[in-house]
Image (cartoon, rainbow, N blue to C red):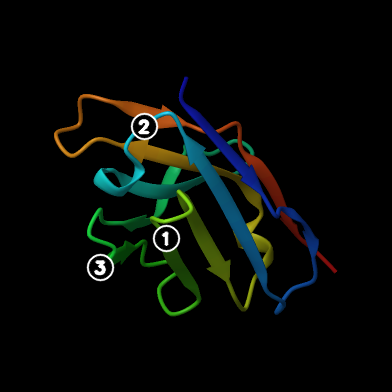
């Protein structure tokens, strides 16, 4: 049974940092693209960052480049999103996503709320 369990969300002040974690099970984690998406109220879900299976590279949305860092630990089947210099525009539900190399399998976590507010 595939599971993606996010944690680490919460309320944080603007300018502060937060790290999200996603623990995965039920599939070959090291072979999958692991991504973070987010969805703000009234907006479509958007891709934030992707970690490639080889763990050697990552891609980011322009809105988070230079502030967010995605990393993975294939030994622990976990992916992380380090978020720095948070702004109220980063407020959203953040979702962990796992996608197989050819795209035939696509799994989602339940999401974790991040609220940036003073």
Q: Residues within 10 Å of mark 1 (few under 14, many from 20)?
A: many
As drawn, is 104 to the left or to the right of 49? left
As drawn, is 6 to the left or to the right of 9? left
Residue depicted at x 66% and y 43%: 112
Residue 84 sits above or below residue 90 on the image: below
Q: Quadrant of residue 12?
A: bottom right
Residue 89 sits above or below residue 47 on the image: below
As drawn, is 109 to the left or to the right of 50? right
Q: Which mark is residue 72?
A: 1
Residue depicted at x 14% and y 34%: 102
How many numbered callouts?
A: 3
Nearer the observer: mark 2 or 3; the answer is 2
Name which of mark 2 and mark 3 comes first in the sequence.
Answer: 2
Element type where label 2 sits in the image: loop
Distance CA(mark 2)–CA(mark 3): 21 Å
| x, y percent for residue 41 | 64, 39
Q: Quadrant of residue 8?
A: bottom right
Q: Quadrant of residue 51?
A: bottom left
Element type where label 3 sits in the image: loop
Provide the residue designation for mark 3: 57
Residue depicted at x 36% and y 32%: 27
| x, y percent for residue 39 | 55, 41
| x, y percent for residue 42 | 60, 35
| x, y percent for residue 64 | 46, 68
- Residue 34 vs residue 93, the one in the foreground: 34
Name which of mark 1 and mark 2 comes first in the sequence.
Answer: 2
Provide the residue designation for mark 2: 27
Q: Which mark is residue 86?
A: none
Nearer the observer: mark 1 or 2; the answer is 2
Distance CA(mark 1)–CA(mark 2): 15 Å
Distance CA(mark 3)–CA(mark 1): 10 Å
């Amino acid at each position: 049974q595939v599971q993606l369990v996010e944690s680490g969300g919460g309320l944080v002040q603007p300018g502060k940092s937060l790290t999200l974690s996603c623990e995965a099970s039920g599939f070959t984690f090291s072979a999958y693209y692991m991504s973070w998406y987010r969805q703000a109220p009234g907006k479509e879900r958007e891709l934030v960052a992707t970690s490639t299976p080889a763990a050697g590279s990552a891609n980011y949305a322009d809105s988070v480049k230079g502030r967010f860092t995605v990393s993975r630990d294939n030994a622990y089947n976990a992916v992380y999103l380090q978020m720095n210099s948070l702004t109220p525009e980063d407020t959203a539900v953040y979702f962990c996503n796992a996608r197989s190399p050819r795209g035939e399998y696509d799994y989602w976590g339940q999401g974790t709320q991040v609220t940036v507010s003073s």
